[in-house]
Image (cartoon, rainbow, N blue to C red):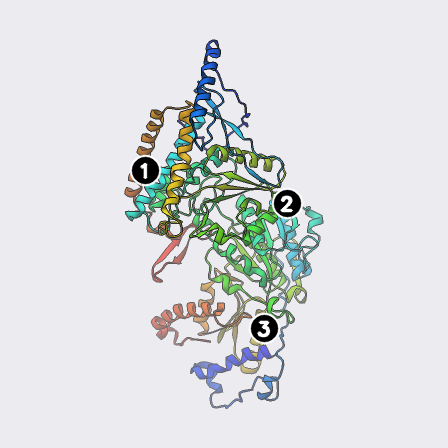
Amino acid sequence: MAVVAAAAGWLLRLRAAGAEGHWRRFRGVGLARGFLHPSATVEDAAQRRQVAHFTFQPDPEPREYGQTQKMNLFQSVTSALDNSLAKDPTAVIFGEDVAFGGVFRCTVGLRDKYGKDRVFNTPLCEQGIVGFGIGIAVTGATAIAEIQFADYIFPAFDQIVNEAAKYRYRSGDLFNCGSLTIRSPWGCVGHGALYHSQSPEAFFAHCPGIKVVIPRSPFQAKGLLLSCIEDKNPCIFFEPKILYRAAAEQVPIEPYNIPLSQAEVIQEGSDVTLVAWGTQVHVIREVASMAKEKLGVSCEVIDLRTIIPWDVDTVCKSVIKTGRLLISHEAPLTGGFASEISSTVQMFNYAICCVELPLYGKPCSIL
Amino acid sequence: MTRAPEGDAEPRPRLPAVVTGHRRHPQHSMKKMLAVFISRVLRRVAQKSARRVLVASRNSSNDATFEIEKCDLHLLEEGPPVTTVLTRAEGLKYYRMMLTVRRMELKADQLYKQKFIRGFCHLCDGQEACCVGLEAGINPSDHLITSYRAHGMCYTRGLSVRSILTELTGRRGGCAKGKGGSMHMYTKNFYGGNGIVGAQGPLAEAFNMAALWKLPCVFICENNLYAMGTSAERAAASTDYYKRGNFIPGLKVDGMDVLCVREATKFAADYCRSGKGPILMELQTYRYHGHSMSDPGVSYRTRDEIQEVRSKRDPIMILQDRMVNSKLATVEELKEIGTEVKKEIDDAAQFAISDPEPRLEELGHHIYSSDSSFEVRGANPWIKFKSVS
């Protein structure tokens, strides 16, 4: 609730930006600072524990991919991996503890079904896991590496950034490790603390040559993971661990693809664009419905899905329509990916606003 | 004299370590044998050379047998053989290859000082026996990956001198189209050329995985005694690198003797091919240049030391003496090869400095594999490059 309220609190600050439109209604109304705060007074807030909250909002059952089954996030990942190993004889899955099914049960049953040469454990060495994965991918096999928690990916950072990302470029397309996919549980889970909660997507966003993808739901996860595995570039697929069990919805049994580098407009709106990814999408959806209900604000909610290369067009088009942008993510604020989105949007929309302001009649403000 | 053909070839049969040579004229053999014996005895009495160049048979222009240094072993019962047969054809090939690498590196040094080559340049002159001996011991279908001191291996793996020097000068005729430079040269079954190298953690992880899964991998340490500017004694708690594989067997090899490297490599490759798992080879060698062109190479070692290695252990000189003394080749023949190599290098250098640079449009290619081209920013945010792959 507090997180939702904090996000909604940002919306309130639009008053100060001098924006036009609906916001004029609130000027002079003199809303208390703690208007949307659940607690009685603002002074109590410092003493209260901030508890993570969100409600998973399933999407409607997809009809176009055949028969569906209720799956949670880890089951949808297992289904995607099962589909991959079935249709690609060179696909292998490896990582710490994947053989028995994985610490989050994402690889349950796969070793029995496909054999120990295709689903196997590695020693405890992330750098070795990714390095080994790069090597296998260079030979042409489809390598699906698991890093047990995204917090542990940093020993492999050199391999990812200096080797995997640059392999194709530095050899002039003679070699590549495009068939490498790295999967890793990501994001806060409530009890994870320092080393089981991190969201490191911003570190990798700084690196051309790789793709970083984060799904918000089981249906999204299976389609995006299959696209990552089939993509000809090394991909990192972060799975929000808090959704492994908490998120369940109807997911097609057969394989299907969701395109990478395409953001999804989950909900259309006209007053403000809200961008998020992973678990935070559900927080933002709740914010959007609260804003509609309490403030009469129509929010357009966008799930970014692919962090790099990100869908600049969808976000910018939306901001041109609404004139306002709010980006929300779990990762730390400084240097987080929101800063890249906001600076890019400001660059494009500043140009557009300067040139086309008379046509649109709307100033642009970014939070 | 032709080099090993490119592409897959039949695995080279292992030469037997026989002591007798091939005879051309059997009817004169007895008289010749006696003459050989006497002259050998006299020669042995006269010579006090530190170099062990013992010839067991004479008067054969086609091959000769040599003794090579015994390798120190770690976790191995047996090592490579201590004698080997060198045919004339092989000898001339190795000589030509080593001389080509030597001259190519010296030409690269010259071009660097003339500022035709920019950036980083790590030369391997002095270490020619390592790359040539290694290639002699493996098949073209084996896979090789190395560090930044790679020019010699680029050549032995099949890239022409012209494509290497042109890549160093950054022109479009280079093997990486001018975009890779010294540290990023690749060809079939050769994965570079790598600028990023890690010595401790990643290596230990690789050793562990290779041993655990019995991967057929030969780990080679070209020990030229200096880690950039730090001597081995000051950088390593244990300088017995061939033992650093711990649970992986290892060999210590005389890396200045191309035949020793060849035999050790064959031994190591056979070991791996038989399914016993990985093996480690330490090649004891020396580099004449500094770590890179920005390192004079004399602030952490003396010129005397460099000169001593040049005069006593130079790999090309060792092979040359062997071949001449055992009549596998004459001094004139080798000089002739030298002249041909010089011409090849000079022609290649001429091409390397006159070839045009790659087109600027290619700068952004192959960052991602993508069905449609997209734009990337360069140093100037308003100038975009199209990226195609």
The reply to whether callout 1 and callout 3 are in contact (CB within 8 Å) is no
Residue for badge 2: B213
Q: Are marks 2 and 1 on the same chain?
A: yes
Q: Are marks 1 and 3 on the same chain?
A: no
Of mark 2 and mark 1, the one earlier in the sequence is 2
Query: Which of B260 and B270 lies nearest the eye of the viewer?
Result: B260
User: Left or right of A31: which side holds B291?
Assistant: left
Q: Work out whether A140 lies above or below A211.
A: above
Label 2 Cα neighbours within 10 Å, binned few <14 / some 14-19 / many ≥20: few
Residue A240 location in percent, x, y? 61, 64
Label 3 Cα neighbours within 10 Å, binned few <14 / some 14-19 / many ≥20: many
Subunit ID for the residue under disc 1: B
Q: Amino acid at mark 1?
A: Ala
Residue for badge 1: B348
Residue for badge 3: A283
Q: Is residue B88 visible?
A: no
Image quarter hosting the N terminus of chain A: bottom right
The reply to whether callout 2 and callout 3 are in contact (CB within 8 Å) is no
User: Left or right of A55: which side holds B201?
Assistant: left
Residue B82 location in percent, x, y? 54, 31
At x 45% / y 13%, what residue is drawn? Answer: B32
SS label for mark 2? loop
SS label for mark 3? helix
Subunit ID for the residue under disc 2: B
Residue B301 location in percent, x, y? 40, 49
Gap in angstroms between the C-alphas marked 1 and 3: 64 Å
Query: Which of A124 and A268 lies nearest the eye of the viewer?
Result: A124
Q: Amino acid at mark 2?
A: Trp
Residue A139 location in percent, x, y? 54, 43
User: Left or right of A50: which side holds A175?
Assistant: left
